[in-house]
Image (cartoon, grey):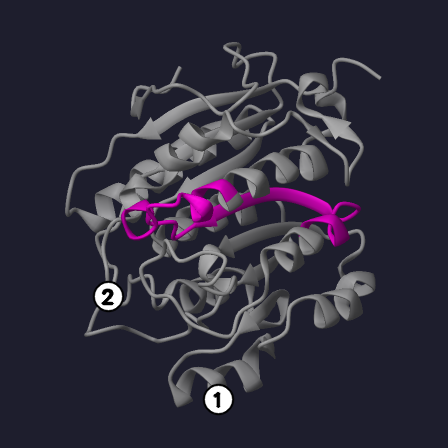
Amino acid sequence: MFHLLDQYAGFIGSSPDYQSSRLVLVGAPMDFTVSFRAGTRQGPQSIRQVSVGLEEYSVMLDRDLADYTYYDAGDIVLPFGHVAESLARIGMVVEQILRDDKFPLVLGGEHLISLPVIQQVAAKYPGLKLLHFDAHADLREDYMGQTLSHASVIRRAVDLVGGRNVYQFGIRSGAREEFAFAKQNTNLFVGKVLEPLKKVLPELAGHPVHITLDIDVVDPAYAPGTGTAEPGGCSAAEILEAIYLMKDLNVVGFDLVEISPVYDHSERTAILGSKLVREAILAFGPKDCKEQG
């Protein structure tokens, strides 16, 4: 089905049937532009591996993975060190998923992998709203002269969808210039996640929404396995509550990035990531992907 993919053991409960699945998980194991600690290329597999420890039932959503049909396509095979070609391959895979009228759920990898995902989702869904959960603004024009960087990914997304369609939550780190840019161009909420999210939900209703979630929005006490940990973040319970708050939005794509398991021998970061994926499938998966009740 995808000639660019490397197939591994899938996420818990995933179906072997691509055609009948309305939601497709795919990994983008890239960490070529990280600015501090590498290792996020191992993120997608760590999320899959710990998923077997989860229940398939979500008591908070009262929904069960057994009632959904979703396909885990494995990881995209990326040419090590080649940023532009890697982004092109990610875009090709996501474009095919969308062309087949399926929901893309992409596992990173560094945050730059979100750019081709957002590009393809925005092309299919005009007027896309981008919800960005992160410790960092990611609004640099460039980082060390490179315009394609995990530190500039949301700046490039602004170029795609327009700043007023970008909503940024949990941001507590960045250069002075990034916050000045955000003040003039995006909807950035410093430090907080749930309070501002609740306020903007009414204006998001009815619009197509893509969610990009950097695990470092969560405080490193709960999620230490990331490359640029930033103290002062939300709790694991709060980021899960954010998923529940968004369940009635028209979410058309989701990506989870920046899990770097080498820095977390307890695996609690990957376990949190895995639970976020489970809740995202149940909260945002196309309603007609249910097979039962």
* Residue at image mark 1: 180
SS category of the residue bearing label 1: helix
Crowding near the residue tagged with mark 1, few <14, some 14–19, many ≥20 C-alpha atoms within 10 Å: few
Q: In the image, residue 114 lies at what x, y percent? A: 43, 51
Identity, as a three-letter code, of the amino acid under mark 1: Ala
What residue span does the magenta drawing correspond to? 243-271
Q: Residue furthest front?
A: 266
Judge by depth and name the residue closer to the eye, 132 or 191: 191
Q: Can residue 194 be seen at all in this image of the molecule?
A: yes
Query: Residue at (33%, 61%) from the top-left corner?
Result: 150
Q: In the image, residue 180 lies at what x, y percent? A: 48, 89
* Residue at image mark 2: 36
Disc 1 from disc 2: Cα separation: 24 Å
Query: Residue at (44%, 71%) from the top-left corner?
Result: 136
Q: In the rendered view, does 105 fall on the left or right side of 279?
A: left
Residue 288 falls within the magenta-colored stretch: no
Going from N to C along the chain, the mark reached first, 1 or 2, is 2
Q: In the rendered view, does 293 fall on the left or right side of 68?
A: right
Up-down: is 222 above or below 196? above
Query: Residue at (43%, 36%) from the top-left corner?
Result: 47
Up-down: is 128 above or below 55? below
Residue 254 falls within the magenta-colored stretch: yes
User: Split into 4 quadrants, where in the image is the C terminus?
Assistant: top right
Q: In the image, residue 252 lies at what x, y percent? A: 64, 42
Crowding near the residue tagged with mark 2, few <14, some 14–19, many ≥20 C-alpha atoms within 10 Å: few
Residues at circles 1 and 2 in contact by the CB criterion of under 8 Å: no
Query: Residue at (48%, 47%) from the top-left corner?
Result: 256
Up-down: is 238 above or below 49? below
Identity, as a three-letter code, of the amino acid under mark 2: Phe
Q: Residue furthest left?
A: 81
SS category of the residue bearing label 2: loop
